[in-house]
């Protein structure tokens, strides 16, 4: 049956702004506030092969959290470090790039075999052809993970794209597999694209990613405070928005004042050229004008645009 759940990923995706150094006090405030708000799922950070640091939202072991989600970028955490799942309160999301799909799905299969609830997160999902999507969905149906997340990495999806890709996948994906959406706000369409998805006739669990004040690199993400209010008003949601605003006031605004994010022309240009947002970020950091950014992005070979290549970009600048 249809259900809509929110996954707040402020502590994970928002961490790109500050190298994930939120500080222990802020981390606890965000976790407690989101729980008080009734947010369904909370992503606590990245699972990485690293040293433990209580001030940073990197985790070296799933045992470091008792409840919530952890994200793994495929290739950054050895599968050997996982043991059998001890608690269904902890779930794993595995993000992967198209060239590594086969290996990543094998990784996900191993996690499922160990009893973990797993989401498969194919980056830049909207760049997949229909035949590539068919192959992906077929493999996901064999693995039977908890969910599949459509990831608008480039932030260049329009409402018609949302209808097309979600309609295509929903018809082919096993009904018991949840369908997620992780959007970026490069075209200021994150909220409207999410509303388009929610109005579709999809009868399965839908999981919407969001961040407080849209916190995330570049143009940022869907705002938790926006989508909670919308769900309360239109879909019978019972989220308490006040704790979210308190987190925004006390924890997020001080970060934004020092390192702002949100819509900007360079990230818009990256989106319309189909380029990874890191291309725009590097060009901005070098003080390059928006006219030049437009020209440089247009010169990046089409097959090199979705995966950030710093050396390629530096060669175009020089």
Image (tube, rainbow, N blue to C red):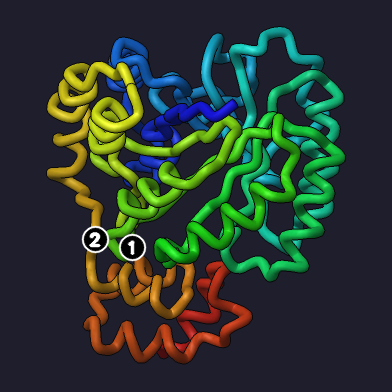
Q: Quadrant of residue 115?
A: top right
Q: Check the image and name the residue furthest to the front.
A: 201
Q: Is residue 128 left or right of residue 158?
A: right
Q: Which residue is label 1 attached to?
A: 186
- Asked if residue 134 is positioned above or below residue 48 in the image, the reply reads below
Marks 1/2: CA–CA distance: 6 Å
Q: Is residue 140 left or right of residue 23?
A: right
Q: Is residue 80 left or right of residue 72?
A: right
Residue plotted at (50% across, 58% down): 163
Residue 72 rendering spot, x and y as whole percentages: 63, 38
- At mark 1, the secondary structure is loop
Location of the C terminus by quadrant is bottom left
Q: Is residue 66 left or right of residue 111?
A: left
- How many neighbours does mark 1 have within 10 angstroms: few (below 14), some (14-19), or many (20 or more)? many
Nearest the eye: 38 or 73: 38
First reached walking from the N terminus: tag 1 or tag 2: 1
Location of the N terminus by quadrant is top right
- At mark 2, the secondary structure is loop
Per the rendering, the mark at residue 263 is: 2
Residue 148 rendering spot, x and y as whole percentages: 65, 41
Residue plotted at (32% across, 53% down): 192
Residue 291 rendering spot, x and y as whole percentages: 24, 88
- How many neighbours does mark 2 have within 10 angstroms: few (below 14), some (14-19), or many (20 or more)? some
Residue plotted at (24% across, 16% down): 240
Q: Quadrant of residue 184?
A: bottom left
Q: Can residue 296 be seen in this snapshot?
A: yes
- Asked if residue 135 is positioned above or below residue 170 in the image, the reply reads below
Q: Quadrant of residue 215?
A: top left
Q: Are marks 1 and 2 in contact (CB under 8 Å)?
A: yes
């Amino acid at each position: 049956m249809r259900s809509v759940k929110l996954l707040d990923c402020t502590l994970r995706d928002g961490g790109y702004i500050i190298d994930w150094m939120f500080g222990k006090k802020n981390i606890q405030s965000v976790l407690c506030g989101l729980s008080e708000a009734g947010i369904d799922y909370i992503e606590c950070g990245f699972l990485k092969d690293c040293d433990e640091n209580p001030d940073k939202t990197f985790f070296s072991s799933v045992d470091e959290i008792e409840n919530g989600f952890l994200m793994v970028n495929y290739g950054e955490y050895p599968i050997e470090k996982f043991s059998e799942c001890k608690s269904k309160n902890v779930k794993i999301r595995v993000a992967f790039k198209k060239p590594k799909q086969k290996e990543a799905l094998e990784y996900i299969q191993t996690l499922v075999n160990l009893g973990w609830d797993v989401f498969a997160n194919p980056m830049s999902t909207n760049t997949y052809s229909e035949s590539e999507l068919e192959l992906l969905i077929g493999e996901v149906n064999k693995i039977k993970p908890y969910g599949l997340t459509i990831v608008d990495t480039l932030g260049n999806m329009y409402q018609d794209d949302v209808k097309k890709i979600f309609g295509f996948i929903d018809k082919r994906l096993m009904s018991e597999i949840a369908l997620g959406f992780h959007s970026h706000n490069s075209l200021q369409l994150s909220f409207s694209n999410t509303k388009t998805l929610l109005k579709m006739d999809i009868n399965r669990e839908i999981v919407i990613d969001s961040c407080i004040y849209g916190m995330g690199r570049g143009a940022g993400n869907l705002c938790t405070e926006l989508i909670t209010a919308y769900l309360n008003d239109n879909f019978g949601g019972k989220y308490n928005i006040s704790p979210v605003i308190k987190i925004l006031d006390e924890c997020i605004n001080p970060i934004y004042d020092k390192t702002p994010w949100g819509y900007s022309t360079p990230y818009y240009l990256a989106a319309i050229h189909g380029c990874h947002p890191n291309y725009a970020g590097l060009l901005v950091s070098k003080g390059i004008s928006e006219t030049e950014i437009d020209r440089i992005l247009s010169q990046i070979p089409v097959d090199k645009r979705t995966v950030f290549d710093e050396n390629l970009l530096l060669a175009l600048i020089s």
